[in-house]
């Protein structure tokens, strides 16, 4: 390891001082440019690359949406039974049809029955029928003789609170999933009583396709995440 | 060393008296120290006690009750509401699992806000435990091309589908592996929990989580007393302090009482499923049997409890 | 014995309080930076880490980047200890202590950078085994805490003993010190390997999850750490009467060249894997070197670092430029900057950009982070300056005192 000692005619130790002005300039240039690069990056900040109309520039919270009920109150029966109902007794919610027209026999008991396919004009003209094939029409599901009930394919009459049996005739796989709890929303106890919905609660039986809804706002982007008070640098 | 001890070496005293004096000194000293220690330990949420408290899991049951009471008093006073902090243990014979039907999710984000409403996340700066990613139907699930900031007037969009992501409660959690102080661990019912009074905020777990499921309180979390959910669990949705990590806990305060998590109940299309994997009659078992499930980033061998599936 | 320790302490205090105007100007400058940094840290304590630009998407950044780089600098002391003690090469043996001093200062800086990064510094005692709950053997950060403290204590003991004995003109106890010095070699390798494992073990971050990350860390540590020492030695030669042979400096520079070669080779291997296999993981390297989707904040730094490293490698490799002190110093600056970027921001940020869910958040440090960083660097430089101030007179005045083992040796300090 000593072979380099003095071989290249170097000056003895201690006489080689720090570099002179020329090389100091080089050092200074390199040092300053690196610092400038750093400063430039810091000045640029991290807020770039977000268009002003892009989502996520403002932070929202659930309180901004009072129209949405985030406190899901359980049905009294479900609440009462709770976890102590391990077989999961299923409670039915109020079918929607009750609110509007029930009982249908009030009008239809004395009315003549017209089985012909037609566009309805006098009543129920607001119903848009868009359920599957073109030859579908009212009496495929409704019972012409007793409007307070629905009619299954084999003639059995069922109430509106059991309308799922009718839907399930054609939509068998969905019906099976729904029965097991995989299809459709449930509330309650995973180890006990649950409440479930009828098909008609989410799907309008006349035009069942699920309508798009307005989404809630996106999360705030990290570069816009601030506390309420302004954060000042220095 | 000197030969005579002026205290113990009192001439004329018998051995019993010598022992008495020595033991008196020692006993007195110990009692004094014990008194100080008891005062320190006894003041449940005193500053010193808070600083020196052991990990929650290592405390005695009585001490836990004391601490929970003190927390309840503290939160109730701070928010002006009647706040409860429970310590409900896991149920026997229960292992939770979660199902998410991506054939149904429409990306409406009601789950995100229901979760925030239920679990007392900071409103400002905003923390959200669930992140809904928008994917293009033509590309399938490709995280690098996804976005969480979609804002169309209506969902679902024609050419997109949606993938909500939160803590997957992995069976092989990388976050638990890397925590340097054992502030996070997996409970017997499968929930990965954080003791927010033990976490030092080093964010190793956030580096290690492949799903971006952990969130940090970058400053003091703020939540108004009207928005507060007063039914809390020590390991779950109780108000967190500044500088600690938090994440989805499968609504531990609800699920350990048998209830569904908040996100399951709010989803308007019923895309979220939850239940006990060990119960063969549960929805989750039916789901695994009848539907084809997949998990995210399965090559990382995290073995999540969060299953995505297509119901159709 | 107590009297001796007391006089050593008071003597050392006198030493650090004496100096010329450049010395005090330097101390004043460091003091200003420290005050600037501490006031920023108080603001951070009050408002939380929100005052940084770290967010959930990029949760480790400036502080951890500096920490990683400085662990490498601390490990670089071994670059002096190996030739001095394994090969018994006298020219370096005389000055190896400065490596220890650098290691101590660097470790202090490392610990400070971790302290300012964690969300709850009041709970840092949770990291102490038995009293807290240090998660061994599972947590790599737990191991890091252990080995960093071990290395710190090791160097403290060695330096304390050497300075103490030199101050009192007594020979050092080589049977005590040399085993510790030899132990510090695997300890130095250990600290940087464990720090590398903190990153390499994270499967969620494919940019880090590579088997060659630990070798890369070691290579870059050995080529960058001694750069400061080289500059220091030149200053010492000029301002004090310490003899530092040219060949000591050249040998260190030569070793740094080889280490840089290894560093560049491993880097090349990484680049090949990324660009040839071209999996999704490539996106992190692309973000670093060419930018993705218009996000390119790190690109100039990445290229500057690479060019600096290659130029420095050539400058150190070619004997002519190695011996010319001008180019040598330029090389030192370049290698230090290159590795600072490469093992600092260019390691941490691309690992987290894009994040695990594919989001691009461009991190750039805030002024508060830079202030705290400057303050910590100033503390480190201050410790190094004070330690040198104590060590140099001991080195200079040592003519006759020798070690117990070897009365013929010409030096008192190893």
Image (spheres, coloured by chain):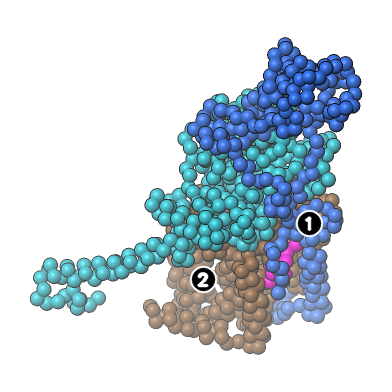
Query: In the picture provided, is A207 more to the left or to the right than B18?
Result: right
- Please report, as a chain letter, where disc 1 is located: A
Q: Residue furthest front?
A: A110
Q: Does residue A183 appear left or right of residue C278 in this picture?
A: left
Q: Is residue C215 visible?
A: no
| In the displayed structure image, the side of residue C372 where residue A114 appears, left or right | right
- Residue at numbered disc 2: C159
The answer to which of A61 and A15 lies nearer the viewer is A61
Dots 1 and 2 on the same chain: no
Instruction: Residue C19 in the image: state x and y as whole percent.
Output: 60, 87
| Residue depicted at x 79% and y 41% | A213
Secondary structure beneath disc 1? loop
- Which quadrant of the structure image shows residue A169? top right
Q: Colour of chain A?
A: blue
Q: Quadrant of residue B124?
A: bottom right
Q: Residue furthest top?
A: A154
Q: Colour of chain B?
A: cyan
Q: Is A150 rendered above or below residue C130?
A: above
Rendered shade, chain C: brown
Q: Residue at x 57, y 87 (%)?
A: C18
Is B10 contained in the magenta span? no
Q: Residue A133 at x, y = what percent? A: 85, 20
Q: Residues within 10 Å of mark 1 (few under 14, many from 20)?
A: many
Q: Which mark is residue A57?
A: 1
Which quarter of the rendering shows the N terminus of chain C? Answer: bottom left
Please state which of residues C291 and C47 is positioned toward the viewer in this rendering.
C47
Does the image show residue B251? yes
Front residue of C390 and C112? C112
Magenta residues (range): C363-371
Circle 2 Cα neighbour tier, 10 Å, few/some/many (<14 / 14–19 / ≥20): many
């Amino acid at each position: 390891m000593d072979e380099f000692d003095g071989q290249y005619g170097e000056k003895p130790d201690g006489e080689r001082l720090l570099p002179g002005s020329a090389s100091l300039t080089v050092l200074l240039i390199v040092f300053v440019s690196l610092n400038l690069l750093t400063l430039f990056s810091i000045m640029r900040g991290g807020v770039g690359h977000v268009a002003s109309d892009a989502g996520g520039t403002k932070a929202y919270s659930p309180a901004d949406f009072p129209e949405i009920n985030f406190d899901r109150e359980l049905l009294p029966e479900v609440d009462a039974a709770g976890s102590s109902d391990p077989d999961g007794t299923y409670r039915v919610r109020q079918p929607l049809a009750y609110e509007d027209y029930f009982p249908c026999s009030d009008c239809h008991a004395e009315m003549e029955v017209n089985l012909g396919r037609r566009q309805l004009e006098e009543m129920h003209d607001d119903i848009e029928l868009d359920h599957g094939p073109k030859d579908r029409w009212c009496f495929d599901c409704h019972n012409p003789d007793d409007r307070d009930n629905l009619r299954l394919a084999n003639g059995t009459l069922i109430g509106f609170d059991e309308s799922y049996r009718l839907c399930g005739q054609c939509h068998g796989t969905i019906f099976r999933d729904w029965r097991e709890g995989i299809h459709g929303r449930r509330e309650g106890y995973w180890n006990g009583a649950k409440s479930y919905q009828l098909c008609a609660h989410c799907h309008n039986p006349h035009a069942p396709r699920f309508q798009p809804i307005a989404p809630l706002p996106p999360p705030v982007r990290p570069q816009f995440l601030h506390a309420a008070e302004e954060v000042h640098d220095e | 060393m000197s030969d005579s001890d002026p205290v113990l070496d009192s001439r004329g005293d018998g051995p019993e008296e010598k022992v008495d004096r020595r033991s008196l000194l020692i006993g007195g000293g110990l009692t004094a120290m014990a008194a100080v220690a008891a005062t320190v330990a006894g003041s449940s949420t005193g500053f010193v006690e808070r600083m020196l408290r052991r990990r929650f899991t290592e405390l005695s049951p009585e001490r836990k009750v004391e601490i929970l009471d003190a927390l309840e008093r503290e939160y109730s006073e701070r928010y002006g509401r009647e706040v409860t902090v429970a310590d409900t243990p896991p149920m026997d014979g229960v292992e939770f699992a979660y199902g998410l039907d991506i054939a149904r999710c429409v990306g409406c984000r009601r789950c995100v806000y229901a979760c925030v409403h239920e679990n007392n996340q900071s409103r400002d700066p905003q923390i959200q435990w669930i992140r809904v990613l928008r994917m293009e139907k033509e590309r399938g699930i490709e995280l690098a091309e996804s976005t969480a900031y979609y804002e169309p007037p209506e969902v679902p969009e024609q050419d997109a589908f949606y993938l909500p992501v939160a803590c997957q409660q992995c069976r092989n959690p990388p976050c638990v592996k890397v925590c340097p102080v054992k502030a996070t661990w997996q409970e017997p019912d499968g929930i990965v929990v954080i003791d927010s009074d033990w976490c030092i905020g080093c964010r190793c777990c956030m580096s290690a989580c492949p799903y971006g499921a952990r969130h940090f309180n970058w400053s003091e979390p703020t939540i108004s007393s009207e928005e507060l959910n007063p039914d809390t669990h020590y390991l779950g949705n109780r108000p967190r302090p500044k500088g600690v990590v938090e994440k989805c806990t499968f609504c531990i305060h609800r699920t350990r009482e048998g209830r569904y998590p908040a996100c399951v109940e709010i989803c308007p299309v019923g895309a979220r499923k939850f239940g006990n994997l060990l119960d063969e009659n549960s929805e989750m078992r039916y789901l695994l049997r009848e539907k084809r499930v997949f998990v995210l980033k399965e090559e990382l061998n995290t073995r999540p409890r969060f299953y995505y599936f297509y119901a159709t | 014995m107590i009297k001796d320790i007391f006089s050593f302490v008071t003597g050392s205090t006198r030493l650090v309080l004496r100096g010329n105007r450049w010395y005090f100007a330097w101390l004043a400058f460091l003091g200003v930076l420290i005050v600037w940094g501490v006031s920023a840290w108080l603001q951070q304590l009050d408002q939380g880490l929100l005052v940084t630009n770290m967010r959930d998407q990029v949760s480790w950044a400036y502080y951890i980047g500096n920490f990683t780089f400085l662990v490498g600098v601390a490990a670089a002391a071994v670059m002096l200890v190996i030739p001095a003690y394994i090969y018994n090469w006298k020219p370096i043996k005389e000055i190896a202590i400065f490596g220890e001093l650098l290691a101590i200062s660097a470790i202090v800086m490392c610990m400070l950078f971790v302290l300012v990064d964690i969300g709850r510094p009041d709970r840092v005692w949770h990291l102490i085994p038995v009293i807290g709950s240090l998660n061994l053997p599972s947590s790599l950060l737990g191991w890091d805490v252990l080995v960093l403290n071990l290395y710190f204590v090791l160097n403290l003991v060695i330096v304390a003993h050497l300075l103490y004995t030199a101050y009192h003109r007594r020979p050092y106890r080589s049977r005590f010190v040399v085993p510790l010095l030899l132990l510090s070699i695997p300890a130095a390798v250990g600290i940087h390997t464990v720090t590398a494992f903190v990153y390499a073990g994270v499967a969620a971050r494919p940019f880090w999850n590579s088997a060659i990350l630990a070798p890369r860390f070691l290579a870059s540590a050995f080529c960058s750490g001694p750069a400061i020492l080289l500059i220091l030695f030149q200053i010492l030669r000029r301002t004090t009467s310490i003899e530092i042979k040219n060949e000591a400096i050249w040998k260190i520079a030569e070793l740094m060249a080889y280490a840089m070669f290894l560093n560049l080779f491993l880097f090349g291997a990484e680049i090949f894997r990324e660009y040839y296999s071209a999996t999704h993981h490539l996106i992190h390297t692309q973000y670093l070197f060419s930018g993705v989707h218009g996000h390119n904040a790190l690109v100039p730094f990445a290229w500057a670092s690479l060019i600096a490293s290659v130029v420095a490698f050539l400058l150190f490799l070619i004997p002519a430029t190695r011996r010319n002190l001008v180019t040598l110093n330029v090389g030192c600056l370049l290698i230090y900057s290159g590795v600072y970027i490469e093992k600092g921001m260019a390691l941490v940020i691309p690992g987290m950009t894009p994040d695990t869910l594919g989001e691009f958040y461009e991190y750039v440090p805030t002024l508060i982070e830079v202030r705290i960083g400057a303050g910590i660097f100033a503390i480190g430089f201050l410790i190094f300056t004070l330690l040198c101030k104590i060590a140099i007179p001991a080195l200079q005045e040592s003519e006759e005192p020798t070690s117990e083992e070897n009365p013929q040796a010409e030096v008192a300090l190893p």
